[in-house]
Image: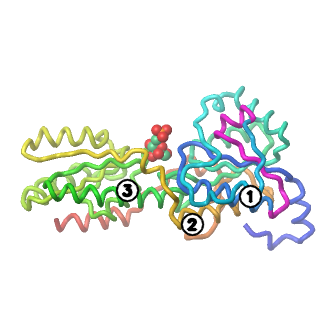
Amino acid sequence: MSTDNMTNQESSTKRKKIQKIGVFTSGGDAPGMNAAVRAVTRAAIAHKLKVVGIRRGYQGMIEGDFINLKSTDVSGIMHQGGTILKTARSKEFRTPEGREKAYQQLKKAEIDAVVVIGGDGSFTGALVFSQDYDIPFVGIPGTIDNDIYGTDYTIGYDTALNTVVEAVDKIKDTARSHGRIFFVEVMGREAGLLALSSGIACGAEAILIPESSDNGSSLNRFLAKGYKDKETSGIVMVAEGEEAGGAMKIAEQVRKDHPDLDVRVSILGHIQRGGNPSAQDRIAATKMGVAAVDALLDDQKSIMIGLMNNKIVHVPFNKAIKLNHSIDEDLIDIQKVLLTNQ
Ligand code: F6P
């Protein structure tokens, strides 16, 4: 956020407080996290701050697994998937003792402020920590699920979407050759956006997501009309959080109900989390990384940096983690229109 309405003197007085920031990645990795680490590091250095990389998420914070980051340490990482800082889901940080240890490690390393790159679990950790300790945290949303309230976009989603589309294009070749129905399971935890968007991009015959009440009938419509009448192949996208319990279970039921159909299942799994980040993920990560450092210098804390209509926004952690990221209803409507014509 800009400091346009502050005098230069006010701005530099505020900005003197922070001298060293920590940056870490947490929860499930997502392509583009490295671009965010790079942007945070370089923006901080541009403001004459020192930067410390905290390795292995909150667990590394508890154990003091820190490395000093210079500008050259983040060279050549922009295009790499995964996270050079590594990541973890720490049970110990959920305890008051774990958080106390983390605080002592941050103090010992003279870290005044922290940027956390992760999903809602990571922001929950930061919010709980900030209730007891005075070190400010600012978050950058990084998860392939794109399920965080207050931002149109989370780092990693675009790359994962393209990975799914590429994989399903290949599955379609073999599905068509054999006249088979494939149930393709896509990640996203309780959110169906990745399945919905990839299903639309791949021209799937049915898309089953937790946010829709129409899953059973859209699948039956395809089985009865699209497949049986036309004897073609078909792709059914299934979000892992769909209430029927995933692609395996649904396919099992379809096999029982329609023993004449040739059904296969493909669970795409962690392939969706890897790979070189797309240009969009790199750019979003870079924008948000720079904005996170600006926010800390402007005395902000317990907020997530988001992108709404391509503009940087600040979202309080308590909103980002408690409210739901709503599914794009337009996409659901589009899917319905197209499937009606099957
Ligand atoms: O949140 C990202 C995500 O990939 C989800 O889509 C998925 O449900 C989960 O993480 C898998 O987590 P893990 O890698 O710990 O099995």
Q: Nearer the viewer, residue 233 or 226?
A: 233
Residue at the spot x=24%, y=67% of the render? 338
Q: Which of the 4 image quadrants contains residue 47?
A: bottom right
- Say which label, 2 or 3, has the lower sequence index: 3
Residue at the spot x=14%, y=54% of the render? 178
Q: Whole-percent x and y of residue 242?
A: 33, 45
Which mark is drawn over residue 308?
Answer: 2
Tags 1 and 2 touching, CB below 8 Å: no
The region drawn magenta spans 46-64
Which mark is drawn over residue 238?
Answer: none
Numbered disc in front, either 2 or 3: 3
**From mark 1 to mark 3, how far is it between C-alphas?**
33 Å
Quadrant position of the C terminus in the picture: bottom left
Q: Nearer the viewer, residue 219 or 87?
A: 87
- Say which label, 1 or 3, has the lower sequence index: 1
**From mark 1 to mark 2, how far is it between C-alphas?**
31 Å
Q: Nearer the viewer, residue 128 or 52?
A: 52
**From mark 2 to mark 3, how far is it between C-alphas?**
24 Å
Residue where numbered disc 3 is placed = 164
Which residue type carries mark 3?
A: Val
Residue 116 position (above or below residue 98): below
- Say which label, 1 or 2, has the lower sequence index: 1
Numbered disc in front, either 1 or 2: 1
Q: Nearer the viewer, residue 22 or 341?
A: 22
Quadrant position of the N terminus in the picture: bottom right
